[in-house]
Amino acid sequence: MKEKYERVGRELVGKGTIVDYYHDSIKIPDGTVETWDFIDHKGAAAVLPVLPDGRIVMVNQYRAALDSFCLEIPAGGYQFRGEPEMEAAVRELKEETGYTAGKIEKILDIRTTVAFCNERIAIFLATDLTPGEQNLDPDEYLSVETYTLDELIDMISRFEIVDSKTICAIMYYRDHISQHRI
Amino acid sequence: MKEKYERVGRELVGKGTIVDYYHDSIKIPDGTVETWDFIDHKGAAAVLPVLPDGRIVMVNQYRAALDSFCLEIPAGGYQFRGEPEMEAAVRELKEETGYTAGKIEKILDIRTTVAFCNERIAIFLATDLTPGEQNLDPDEYLSVETYTLDELIDMISRFEIVDSKTICAIMYYRDHISQHRI
């Protein structure tokens, strides 16, 4: 079943700092035209940084949308649409944690919330890490913390880690080291 | 480090069908006030339905935000803010796939995209499934497909499954059956 949907209109409702908001007119298979939300995002890159002893480097930062602090893997939006994703991953890892990676490889490509937004996050595994200086954006304040994989999985099971890109990366990595696929 | 951020204003930019869009005024730790995007979403429930033979029930549907079809676990938004999440999970499973679950338990609580949106998805594992009739929303067209866990993980590894709630659920389930925790 591949029913036919067609976008027949797109109205800009508001431009934002990291997203723009639209009302799309979508013709659904029965011919009716409905208004659907569309949030346009440039995309982002994220990194799962694994230290030689197996500990994972995380960042803890305030997220206004949740009105709480959130423990996440390092990540950041592209500086322009079409920025090479690995360059963005390397930059965000360095800026947020100070680390540079001797080895970096893509492990996942996710869409965060498909019902209304096109945000795509490329997720990389970074190893052979060398520490260095953070270089945060002017409005960015975060703490760098390290955890074992078991600690992180326990926090996911207790709903203490909730960020979707972070859960995807950690659980994928866990399976793949247990399968010796990474 | 728990730096102080404070929301000092919130302006409604546009109301939508499933989200509303705001510009927030956020006072950051250095005292500057910045405009940050905020997308308000009522939240959703999702279900990983596992058949007695281990196959997993998935839905394949068109997603206008991606302009493509997307293979996902069954899910749907709350009908009202504060709807009990398990009731929503049971309803969406039945509506989208026809199945009712003899056993349903919460496995994950995720925030899809923490930089600008408060969307939260409660994810349940459903087993002891009994087939029945689908009951789709009038504008909903989707096909129900079943896959083995290995097939799904291969599709994740090839970036063919990209939906974040789906990757979280599948990878978490894989780890937990391998650990005999479920």
Image (cartoon, coloured by chain):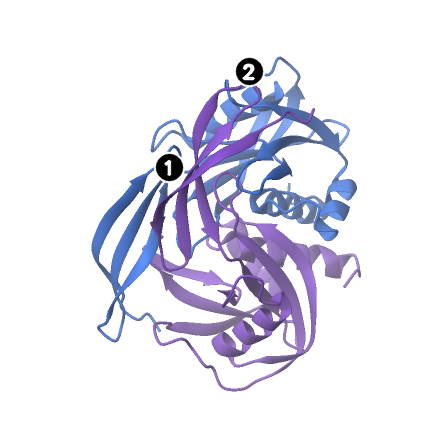
Chain colours: A purple, B blue
Quadrant of the frame with the N terminus of chain B = bottom left
Q: Residue at x 47, y 82 (%)?
A: A134
Residue lying furthest top: B133
Residue depicted at 53% across the width and 58% down the height: A43
Tag 1 subunit: B
Q: Quadrant of residue A38?
A: top left
Q: Nearer the viewer, residue B110 or B68?
A: B68
Number of on-image labels? 2
Q: Residue drawn at (49%, 47%), measured in percent from left and top?
A: B110
Q: Nearer the viewer, residue B174 or A10?
A: A10
User: Could you tell me the amino acid type at mark 2?
Assistant: Asn
User: Which mark, by number, is residue B42?
Assistant: 1
Q: Which mark is residue A79?
A: none
Q: Which mark is residue B135?
A: 2
- Residue B119 falls in which quadrant of the image? top left
Q: Nearer the viewer, residue A32 or A62?
A: A32
Whole-percent x, y for residue B109 in the image: 48, 45
Name the residue type under label 1: Lys
- Seen in the picture, residue B122 relative to B50 is either above or below; the reply is below
**Secondary structure state at the residue bearing disc 1:** loop
| Percent coordinates x, y for residue B22 in the rendering | 30, 48
Q: Position of residue B148 (x, y in %)?
A: 77, 36
Query: Which is more toward the observer, B152 or B55?
Result: B152
> Which comes before the other along the chain, label 1 or label 2?
1
Q: Secondary structure at mark 2?
A: loop
